[in-house]
Image (cartoon, grey):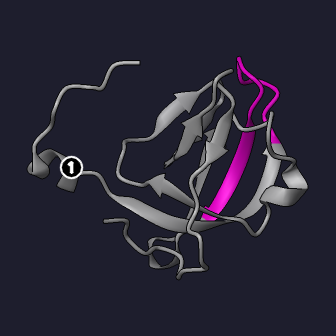
Amino acid sequence: MEAKPEISWEDFEKIDMRSGTVLSVSDFPKARKPSYILEIDFGELGIRKSSAQITELYSKEELVGKQIIAVVNFPKKQIANFFSECLVLGVYGENREVTLLSPSLEVKNGCQVG
């Protein structure tokens, strides 16, 4: 896979990536691809919801309490009958399965990635 075009430092600074803790997980049967609906606590930024295609590697039970990294300053995106309020970040594997990005140590919810 080729690298994407170079961006400026100013472009990167526009992306607001934050730490959050998954509070709840539910199935999302109306999504085209198998997905969960996550409710995530971002501390002072509040609680936001996201749709995530992470069903291959994660059970609902193991996600609750897990810290993740997400982009919190995208506009809401409608997916079926649901509005996703943030983009949970992960790494695509060889078969497009997603491994979540998460802090290696516990951090405060809402901390910025930089």
For the N terminus, the image quarter is: top left
In this rendering, is residue 66 above or below 7? below
* Camera-side residue of 18 and 73: 18
Q: Is residue 83 magenta?
A: no
* Residue depicted at 53% across the width and 70% down the height: 42
> Image quarter for residue 27?
top right
Label 1: how many Cα within 10 Å (few below 14, some 14–19, many 20+):
few
The residue segment tinted magenta is 27-40
In this rendering, is residue 34 above or below 49? above
All told, the count of numbered labels is: 1
Q: Is residue 37 magenta?
A: yes
In the image, 35: left or right of 110?
A: right
| Residue identifier under label 1 | 12
* Residue depicted at 52% across the width and 58% down the height: 69
* Residue depicted at 54% across the width and 80% down the height: 107
Q: Position of residue 8 (x, y in %)?
A: 10, 43
Q: Determine the secondary structure under disc 1.
A: helix
Q: Position of residue 53 (x, y in %)?
A: 68, 33
Three-letter code for the amino acid on which mark 1 is drawn? Phe
For the C terminus, the image quarter is: bottom left
